[in-house]
Each structure stands twice: as C-alpha cells, then as structure tokens.
Amino acid sequence: NITVTNTQLSNIILKLNSPFYGSTENATLTAEINGTSRSSTVIVEPSTKDFILNVDNDGFHLVHGFSKTIAVSASPIGDCNEPFPDSSITYNLEIINGMQFGHLKNMLNGNVGVSLQNIDQIEGSMNFQFIADGEIPLQEETITVRISSSSSGITGTEISFFVNPNDILVTFLPPSIQPTDTTDIVLKMRDTTGVVVDFPEDQSFSLELTDGSDCGDILFLFRGMFWVDAKLLEYAYKPFKFAARDMPLNGSVQTTILVSTDKDGKKLWGSGIITIGKDSSHIAAYFEKSDLAPGDTVNVIVKKVDGNGNETDYPPDTPFEVAIVKGCGLGLINGTSDHLSNIQQPIKFVVADSLTSTDSVVVLRVGAPVVEESVANKTIVNTPALSKAKNAKSNMNIKTAQNANAKILAQTTNEDVCTIYTPIYTNTSDAAATIGGDCDYIPTCTGQSAEPTWTVNSNYKNGDFGFYGCVDVPPPLGYFIPINTNTNTAFEDYLFSICKNSNSKKKEVTFASPIALRAILDYCADNIESYHFIEIPNDNKTVIKSLISEAEAPRAFLDFYHHVQWPLGAKYAVKELIMYHEILHREDYEEDVVKIVWNMGNTFNGNKYLNYGTALKNVVADCKKSNSLNDLIMKTKELQNSILGQLLKDINTKINEIKKDHDEGDVSAERFEKWIKPIRYYQTLLKEIYPNAKYDLKYEM
C-alpha cells in the first residue's frame, strides 16, 4: 500500500519485484480516493527462458589443412524473455556429416573431437573451430555440425559448410610482416601430380579474408594503375598484396586468406596464413647461399628471433635437430646423415659429388628448444612434438639469403617428408636451396647486355590474322588497329642470347631484335567506291587537275579541310591524307599506350622490376634444369611469353581506359600541327592549279 498526493498520480508505475515464471495471472489494482474505491485488473505475463541458437557464417568454404572459427549466439524468443541463457546452461557440438574430413575444437579448453559436450557459454555466445585435417577430399565435400544445449527450452541449430581440396598454393613474400607493412600474395597451382606450376598471366581469382579479417586488407591494382584495398575480391587479376593495418601488438596475430578460381571447367580452392608481428621467440633457419652445385659444402644459418623480429645467436651449447625433408639423395647433414639430433652449431650441408635424385631442391627442417623470453634468466625448454613440425616460413626476416629461402619454399610442393622421423621440437624452421650442375654450357658474356627496346610493326593489311576492319559500321576509309588478341598474334618473333657475367656469374639476356607489337594500318579502297568518292591517289598536279575542275575546286578545298576527321559526306577523298590520319593514330598508340605501359613497374615470380624491359632482360630459366643452351633459351622464352602476356593485358587495359573519352578525330595536341601540314599542302596545290577559283578561306589550314 502506498499513499500519494493528487499531483503524483501520473507518476505511478507498476513493476515486478522479481522475474515471474509459470502461467499467466491476473493482478487486481485498487485505488481509494476520498473514501471511493475503484479496481482494475492487470494481466501479468510470465518471463520465459526460451532461446534459439544461431551461427553467423553458414555455407562458407574451407580448404583442407586449414581451420575456420564459427561463432554461436542465442536469440531470445518472445517479448518477455530473459536477455541471455542462464550461465549454468552448456552447449554441445556434433559432426553429423563429413566427420572423416576433420574435427571440432573447443576454443575455451582446447579439447578436440567429432563430438564435444558441456561447452561453457558466456551470455549465450560461444566460439568453436572446425579443423579440416582429416581425409583429403577429392572434390568439394559438405560438413554438417549439429549445435544443441543442455536446456530443453533452447532450440538448437545445424550449420553446413564445404571442405575443398587444396589445389592453389598460397604463399606470401615476405612470409611475415609487421603492422603497416605489405607483402606480396603469390598464387601457384598444384597440377594432378602435385607439382607446383604457374597460373596463366590472364587467370582471374576471387580472394576473401576470413579469420583475422580485421587485421588488414587485400590490395589489387585497379585497372593496372593504382592500389585499392578490399576484404573481398571477385574475378580480379594479379598482382595482389596484403597490407597489415596499424595496430598495437603484443606478440603476433594471423589472417587467413581464401582464394578460388575456375580452371579447365573446375573450381580450384586454396588458403594461406600471413603472420603479423612475431611470436615471443622462435627459430629462423636458411642456407648461407641458396644456389648449390655438386660437391659444395654450405653453412646452415640458425638464428633466434625475438618478439620484435631481432635476430640473435643461440647459446653455443643449444641442441638442434636437423632432418632432410625434401631432396633426400642430394647430400647429407654434416656429411654423415639424413637426420641428426642433439647437434650443435656449426651445421653444414654437404652436396653429393654426383646427383642421382630427380629433385633439384633440398629442404632441411631445423628444430630448436623454445626459449622462454619472460624468465629473467632465460631457460631452454625441450617440448616434445605433438604433431608434424609446422613449416616456419613465416618466421624469416627480409634479408637476401632469407628471401631466396622463402622464394624456393614458395615454389616447392608441400609433400610428405622423405626422411621418416619423430620430431623432438615443435619450434622449427625450413631452410631451402636449389642444387644442380654449374651450368658450364652457358658462354661468358663478351660485352654489356642492354634492356630490349620495343616498336610497333603496322605493315599488316586488312584481313591479316582474321581482322577485317574495313567492314566496320560505318565502313571506314582506313583504319589502324593493334593485333592484341593473344601473345602468339600480338608479337613478332625475336632473337636473344644468354650468357654468364664473368664477374657476378649472373645469367644475362641480350636481345638481338626489339619486341615488336603487330598492328594493321590499311586503306579501305572498296569503301572509297561504295561512298562514291572521287579518289585523289597522289599529289601529282596533272592527276589532280584531271579529277577536279576549276568549278569544283572550292568544293574540293572544303573536302580537304574535312580530312581533319573522316571526310564522310565529301565528294573528294585524298588517299595520302586518309593514311596519314591512321598514322597519327598509330603514333598516339605508341606514345599514350605502349610507351606508358612498357615503363610501368611490374612483378613476376615474386620479383619486382622497374619496367617490362628490365623484367625481360633479367628473367632466366633455371639453368640446372636444362641440359643445353638451346634448352635453356627455350625455357626462358616460355617465361618471357608470360611476361609479354602481362604486358599485353596491361596494354589492353590502357586502351579501354582511353576509349571512353576517345573520338575518331582525336589526335594528341602535340601531333595536331603535323596533321594539318599535309592538308595545307593539298589545299596549296589546288590553289596553285586554280588560282582564280573562289575558295572559302576560313577553311584554309
């Protein structure tokens, strides 16, 4: 009971003292004013504890060998519901389809399995992982996980998603970065035999940041001109980068990128993980030099890397484990074995005097005890490995030897180790080098090589290579068009040689001819007739006088002026002026397209080049995989074709940009004066032939 004044009546509200559960009830409210009572009934609805479970990312794609974090939340049912389930309620997970392809992981306690029970939730939310580490799928497989709870009042749910074969090798150069840094995304394809090969230069890809997407962005070249950031890309073309955002870090974070593409009627998938920042302490291993020959002995450099990326030496008595995981038969660790444990530095690799293995790459997996950075007097801890040692490419800094190490690893098939052993340590790093002959068949350079030049060969005619520009609508009087359908038709054949620099031993390419782009520049004589033009074939005064009378001279004078654009609607057409118009279009193409694109920076096989000439000069096939100079030249030509394919793609992109604002009569301002000179010349000839004709001089050039 409460007593209030008359002025306080509007401020009275009804409120339950505590949550009300059970059945709906009626409450009677009685008010007495000056001895008069009035009553009213209030319906009291009970609170409920009914919820429905939700997941935030149903239907996603996952690649074998990778994991995905899945978030679960509870939504209340009804207006009078509690906001969250009681904290005593737990969740359950069970794989009901596709359990052979992976397992579940409880993010709170690390428990794994195909069925997990009694998982704690916080205000209705819980995260778990699906790790696709089971059978390798031969095709896309569907995984279904049932999510339930310990309460009958909570409606469970199911989530279905897809696990795909790992057909795209996704790596990063450099493999780990700091906040605000960028890294190149390198995409290669695993063929049906597992061999890693390059994609065609015109291959398009879809990319998406999944776990850790808030840590950075994908960068791609918009129209080949400037970098644009995105979380999701569809049908985009290389090159791609990843840029880490500016963020404070204590340790490291990781971002997963999912990549897909269509190839030969099949959808291919791949994933990669980029590490941002550094773990508290880890190992980095690499060969002192990455290009080895039979009989060589090379040091294996092993460093300890702290949380800031600084390298220091391990204590002299640190025990290491080293095993050959690829390239068994190419040599021995310390000249004695494929696998050594509890050895100390220096560690050496001795290449066999004669090579019988078909491999040309050797990979050593080096393990070291973890150094606990948080302890004042740092201690060495031997941690037994619970699974295969993880590839530690992401633990290497950007130095010359380490970059070479990362590039070799990026092109190496991720296959089973060739030395069977149980690793002692989980803290491991891979060191890689290429091995082959010393390429003595390559001659020594006798002079200094130069970058190739380019030119446009427009001597081709209408009908060549299947181009029939004279039948366009409206039919032109002449036309210029680059033959840019593919590299086979776009470029003339060219000659080059390969030699070895006597000082640096670097392989160099010398071009004996320029890179010539094919184009058609032709005169459409049939269209001259169809328009009923009177053709002026040349500047011979006698010929001109025979075709143009004095009475027609003013009309011809005006028609010559209209050759600034196409002289459609005119009576007289001058062949030389029509051809000169197309020559100016060729010059525009040379200056405004080819020259600009040729000088663009580009990336090929993870290496950056200032322009296309630099790339063509410096890209040489692996001489150790060739048995003769001719074979090396042939394989280098294949690499050059890939570079020219990218050049052609960039040229076509530039052409499409210009076309949007292009008019047939447009020529650059720099070349306009050149354009009006021949028109002025023909007008002057006409005035000399018929000096008394009445010309409209406002059309005089």
Image (spheres, rainbow, N blue to C red):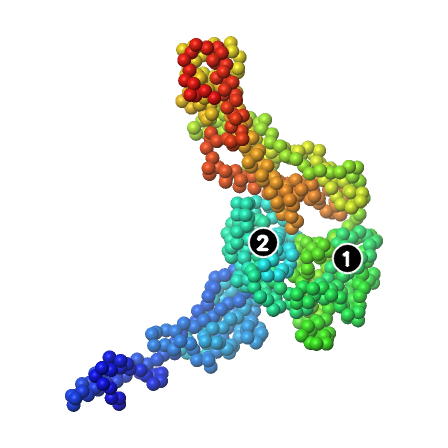
Judge whether residue 165 can be spotted in this image.
no
Asked whether 484 or 63 is in front, the reply is: 484
Asked whether 292 or 164 is in front, the reply is: 292
Q: Residue at 68% across / 54% down in the picture?
A: 407
191, above or below 370, in the image: above
Judge whether residue 116 can be spotted in this image.
yes
**Which quarter of the picture shows residue 489?**
top right
Quarter of the N terminus within the rendering: bottom left
**Which quarter of the picture shows residue 104?**
bottom right
**Which quarter of the picture shows residue 362?**
bottom right
Q: CA distance from mark 1 to mark 2?
A: 28 Å
655, above or below 232, in the image: above
Q: Residue at 66% across / 71% down in the picture?
A: 386
Closer to the chain start, of discs 1 and 2, is: 2
The dot on residue 288 is 1
Tally the marks: 2
The dot on residue 241 is 2
